[in-house]
Image (tube, helix red, strand yellow):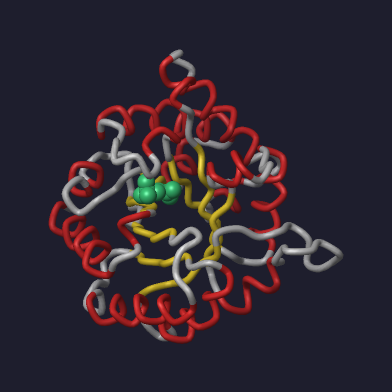
Amino acid sequence: MRTPFIAGNWKMHKTVAEGVELAAALKTSLADVSSMELAVCPPATAVAAVADVLKGSNIGVGTQNMHWEDQGAYTGEISPLMVKELAQYVIIGHSERRQYFGETDETVNRKLKAALHHGLTPIVCVGESLEQNEAGKTVPFVGSQIRGAFAGISAEEARRVVLAYEPIWAIGTGRTAMPEDANEIIKTAIRNVLTDLYDEETAQAIRVQYGGSVKPHNMAAFIVMPEIDGALVGGASLQAEAFTAIVRNALAAL
Ligand code: PGA
């Protein structure tokens, strides 16, 4: 059985003070949740303070990116060792990083290997553009992202990876994939490819979140899908009430 997992990606929002306030509110409002894994991914500047607030709680902390090297002359980057000091999760290959910051399947693969090597839980994002979607290229494209991400990674390591299927056209647009479509894409472009790369058991062990305009009112429709194990939430994770409602609605639907 795959434990459901809902994570908030705060993106470039929240100062330290704002992040601490949000984390403190979530710590209280979600304190009773035990059947689901929860995490928030603040901007790097707020990770330490948020981790401090959430210490000993049922809400984990992650970063939104990291470099693959342990240290070095990489201005502006943070390393797995730095992440590990404060957080247990790391988002890798978010479409915004692929689109604006030159992230490729190769850098995703390097980062994924580094995250696994350092015992972090990676949340690896994949997803097609509107153009690819309309051209019917979703399944081969997402499949190639999966193959690229997992190159040289053992089955044992692969099981520790969390994937997020996030169609780019659904991110921040208020437009979601149809839950049935997302379910089918996860099945054909993700689990079938993982079965091909590893085996059925490994493919079934890996959790896959849906992401892209997840809100309180649509969470249930996604979480009831057999292939969808949770959500990566952007905009709606910035307010305690909305993120709490997403978690509650998912719990009620399971
Ligand atoms: P959104 O972002 O919920 O604001 O669409 C999701 C994401 O980018 O992870």
Residue 14: image quadrant is bottom left
Residue 84: image quadrant is bottom right
Measured from the top left, where is residue 147 in percent x and y?
A: 61, 33
**Left or right: 129 with respect to 239?**
right
Residue found 48% across the figure and 74% down from its top:
15
Q: Which residue appears farthest toward the left when viewing the image?
A: 252
Nearest to the observer: residue 211 or residue 36: 211
**Left or right: 52 with respect to 78?**
left
Q: Which residue appears farthest toward the right when viewing the image?
A: 73
| Position of 101 relative to 160 (above/below) | above
Measured from the top left, where is residue 26 in percent x and y?
A: 30, 75
Measured from the top left, where is residue 18 in percent x and y?
A: 40, 77
Residue found 48% across the figure and 28% down from its top:
129
Residue found 24% across the figure and 51% down from its top:
215
Nearest to the observer: residue 70 or residue 113: 70
Measured from the top left, where is residue 144 in percent x and y?
A: 59, 28
Nearest to the observer: residue 212 or residue 126: 212
Please say whether residue 21 is visible from this viewpoint.
yes
**Left or right: 33 with respect to 5?**
left
